[in-house]
C-alpha cells in the first residue's frame, strides 16, 4: 500500500476543464488555462463529536467499524453535511450511530484533524459538544459504521486506544471543564 498523501498533492488535473496543470502541490489549485482559471482551496471539512457521560460519570465511546481507525475508540459523531448546522449534524450522527436522542448540547472546543481516505489525507475541523441524551436505553450500533460501544472512565482510555488525537484533546478539555 502506498503512503497517504495530502489532498493538495493528489490534484493535477482541473476538475472543470480537465487540463493538466503540469504540477501538483499547489495551494490553492489554480487551473493554468486562461479561459478557465478554476481555483480550488483545500479548506478543511467540518466534523462533530459528542461527549456523553452516564450517571456514573463514564464517557461513551464507540468502537469504530470503518477506517480510519477501525477497531479503535472514538466519540460518536461524523461529518457535517452541506446545508446542515453543526448542531443538526451532532443530533443526526448520534441518532444514526447509536439510536440515541440528543436533548441538549453545549459547545466545548474545536481541534484541527486529518482524515485519511483512500490514500488521501484531508484536513478537517473537529467541533466537540457535550451532549445530554433522553435515555441510554435502546442503544443500537449502526451496522457497518459502529462495531459496539463502551462507557469508560476517561483516565482509563490511553491515547493509543483512540482513533484520533483530537478526541483525546476534547476529553482533556472536558476534564478541565469539570475539574475547574
Ligand atoms: Zn480548468
Image: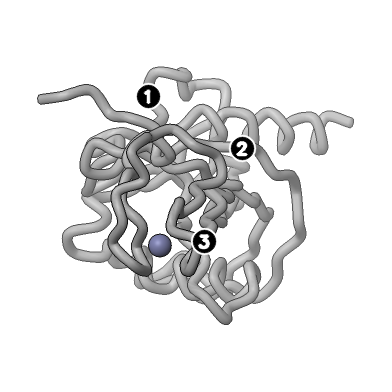
Q: Earlier in the sequence, mark 3 or mark 1?
A: 3
170, 7: nearer the viewer: 7
156, 176: nearer the viewer: 176
Q: Quadrant of residue 90?
A: bottom right
Of circles 3 and 1, the one toward us is: 3
Residue drawn at (62%, 42%) of the image? 57
Q: Residue furthest front?
A: 34
Look at the numbered disc 1 and give the secondary structure of its residue: helix
- x then y, percent, for residue 36: 47, 67
Of circles 2 and 3, the one toward us is: 3
Look at the numbered disc 3 and give the secondary structure of its residue: loop
Q: Which residue is mark 1?
A: 161
Q: Quadrant of residue 58?
A: top right
Quadrant location, the N terminus: top left
126, 90: nearer the viewer: 126
Q: Earlier in the sequence, mark 2 or mark 3?
A: 3
Q: Quadrant of residue 18?
A: bottom left
- x then y, percent, for residue 127: 64, 51
Of circles 1 and 2, the one toward us is: 2
37, 56: nearer the viewer: 37
- x then y, percent, for residue 44: 56, 49
| Ligand 1 has an atom within 8 Å of the beta carbon of the residue at disc 3 | yes
Residue drawn at (54%, 71%) of the image? 89
Count neighbours of disc 1 (C-alpha within 10 A) and say few if under 14, some if 14 to 19, many if 20 or more: some
Q: Which residue is mark 3?
A: 37
In the displayed structure, 154 sits above or below 111; it is above
Q: Which residue is mark 2?
A: 112
Gap between marks 3 and 1, in whole Å?
Answer: 45 Å
- x then y, percent, for residue 96: 37, 72
Amino acid at each position: 500500500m502506498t503512503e497517504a498523501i495530502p489532498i493538495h498533492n493528489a490534484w493535477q488535473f482541473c476538475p472543470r476543464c480537465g487540463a493538466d496543470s503540469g504540477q501538483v502541490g499547489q495551494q490553492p489549485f489554480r487551473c493554468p488555462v486562461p479561459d478557465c482559471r478554476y481555483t480550488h482551496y483545500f479548506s478543511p471539512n467540518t466534523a462533530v463529536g459528542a461527549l456523553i457521560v452516564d450517571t456514573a460519570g463514564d464517557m461513551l465511546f464507540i468502537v469504530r467499524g470503518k477506517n480510519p481507525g477501525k477497531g479503535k475508540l472514538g466519540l460518536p459523531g461524523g461529518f457535517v453535511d452541506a446545508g446542515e448546522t453543526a448542531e443538526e449534524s451532532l443530533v443526526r450522527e448520534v441518532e444514526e450511530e447509536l439510536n440515541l436522542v440528543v436533548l441538549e448540547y453545549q459547545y466545548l472546543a474545536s481541534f484541527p484533524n486529518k482524515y485519511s481516505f483512500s490514500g488521501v489525507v484531508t484536513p478537517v475541523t473537529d467541533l466537540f459538544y457535550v451532549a445530554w441524551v433522553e435515555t441510554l436505553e435502546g442503544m443500537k450500533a449502526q451496522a457497518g459504521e459502529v462495531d459496539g460501544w463502551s462507557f469508560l472512565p476517561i483516565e482509563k482510555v490511553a491515547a493509543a486506544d483512540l482513533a484520533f488525537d483530537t478526541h483525546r484533546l476534547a476529553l482533556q478539555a472536558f476534564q478541565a471543564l469539570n475539574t475547574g
